[in-house]
Image (cartoon, helix red, strand yellow):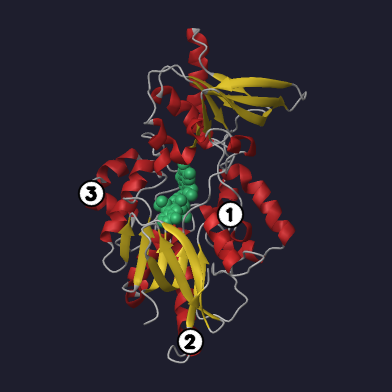
Amino acid sequence: MPNHDVELLAVGAGPSNLALAVALEELAPQLARDSLIIERDSDVSWQRGMLLPEALSQVSFLKDLVTLRNPRSKFSFLNYLHDTGRLNEFVNMGSFVPYRVELAGYLRWTAEQLSMVDLQLGRECVDISPIWTDDVLTGWATKTADGRVIRSRYLVVGVGRDARIPQPLQGVAQQRVIHSTQYLQRIAQLRNGLPYRVTVVGAGQSAAELFSAVQNDLPECRPTLVTRSIGLNCYETSKFNNELYFPSFVDEFYIARPEARRQMLTEMRHTNYAGLAPSTMDSLYRQMYLDRLSGRDRLRMITMHDITAARDDGDEIVLELTDRRTGAVQQLRTDLVLLGTGFSELMPRMVRRLAGSLGLSDITVTRDYRLAIDRPSTAACYLQGVNEATHGIADSLLSVLAPRANDILQDILRHQDAAELATPDPTQVSASIAG
Ligand SMILES: Cc1cc2nc3c(=O)[nH]c(=O)nc-3n(C[C@H](O)[C@H](O)[C@H](O)COP(=O)(O)OP(=O)(O)OC[C@H]3O[C@@H](n4cnc5c(N)ncnc54)[C@H](O)[C@@H]3O)c2cc1C
């Protein structure tokens, strides 16, 4: 493909695009050798802001990058354990859920095993533009932070979702606001002996983990958990509902009517969001209990309150909390806000900008995750991990990674065949990269 640097460029080396890299190497070696993954960080990891030493993954190790597609793969989590000499210990643990740090190690190991797909670390994508050749979309020009541009026919965006920062907190000094995605990196930069007043916002697993972790990381701090809900709940673990995380459920969800999709997402919400793992809940309650027992009175929970405003006041942030029951307003002065508020439901900014430059009013993908573009095209773009609204609640999780990588790969292979026939003759037309 002389007009392109690589046939396929994947942005982000998280689980989604690593699963794709594995599928490429196993099923399409020729395309694999013409594929590049770029990752903004200097190494491969997983949820690095929340790689807390004792945090567990919430899904089975069998939902790794490949096993549900190819249980015989050398890229499996089990082979990682075997290769690193820890298989016996893991089996002896008798647990299906690995530690988060182990999964990060597995992803790093997988990246090292790739022999065909090129993976370049420390390359942040800052912009993507469509390449037009005589009104036909023929590729993508991806600009990286070092100023270089990578041209590809296929683009797969797997950059995760954007952090959700509650609106009132967007206007205050951001050095005192830490979203969970940044927690470990930024907490390490604070002087840990100071008696910070810390406000943790949220009622899900991340908020609970932040509330626990900060007690160790800033031993003199006084954390307060602020939630809108009436209290903390465990996430739902019904095995029946868990079947909705099966890869086969994606088809059922995709063909469902809009109101049925909404119902399923609403009912499934408590299986993933806004809930705690039972072990986290138990440990959190014990922390509160011991705090009261010791009379230290260091930990606080404020439930059923909205943060309705926030402002800087010298070195403090003043939060305005509105009681959902009575409407009464109180102020909470704090030195640090930790956000366990999850992720935006919107498409990532990078995708929205790209859609804007394509003139798309709606961002939708096909069943095979290909961005719908209503213009003549010999190129294609795929979105990973951001299609919960059309592909179901498992889309942002590990559960569907392996089969999804195959769906995308097979679509690219079919599209490649068709696009070869439709590619304009490069000697007859002039190409332009739209801004
Ligand atoms: C704390 C936490 C715990 C979780 N635990 C679980 C769990 O137990 N089980 C589960 O199924 N799911 C879990 N999830 C959901 C999680 O989203 C998925 O497991 C998975 O990480 C999604 O993979 P991804 O590759 O789509 O996105 P991500 O894992 O977010 O990876 C995106 C990658 O893209 C890179 N990147 C971002 N922007 C750019 C750019 N501009 N240029 C280049 N590279 C870029 C990032 O550095 C990152 O490496 C958890 C999420 C969080 C936040």
Residue labelled with disc 1: 244
Tell me: 138 left or right of 228. Answer: left
Q: Which amino acid does the dot numbered 2 rest on? A: Thr
Residue 393 in the image: above or below residue 339: below
Mark 2 and mark 3 lie on one chain; the one further toward the N terminus is 3
The spot of residue 320 in percent (x, y) is 66, 25
Q: Which amino acid does the dot numbered 3 rest on? A: Thr
The reply to whether dot 1 and dot 2 touch (C-beta < 8 Å) is no
The reply to whether dot 1 and dot 3 touch (C-beta < 8 Å) is no
Residue labelled with disc 3: 84
Q: Residue furthest toward the top?
A: 295
The residue drawn where x is 45% and y is 16% is 195
Classify 10 Å Cα crowding around label 2: few (below 14), some (14-19), many (20 and above).
some
Q: Give the CA distance from mark 1 to mark 3.
A: 33 Å
Label 2, secondary structure: give it.
loop
Residue labelled with disc 2: 423
So how many labels did they put on this image? 3
Mark 1 and mark 2 lie on one chain; the one further toward the N terminus is 1
The reply to whether dot 2 and dot 3 touch (C-beta < 8 Å) is no
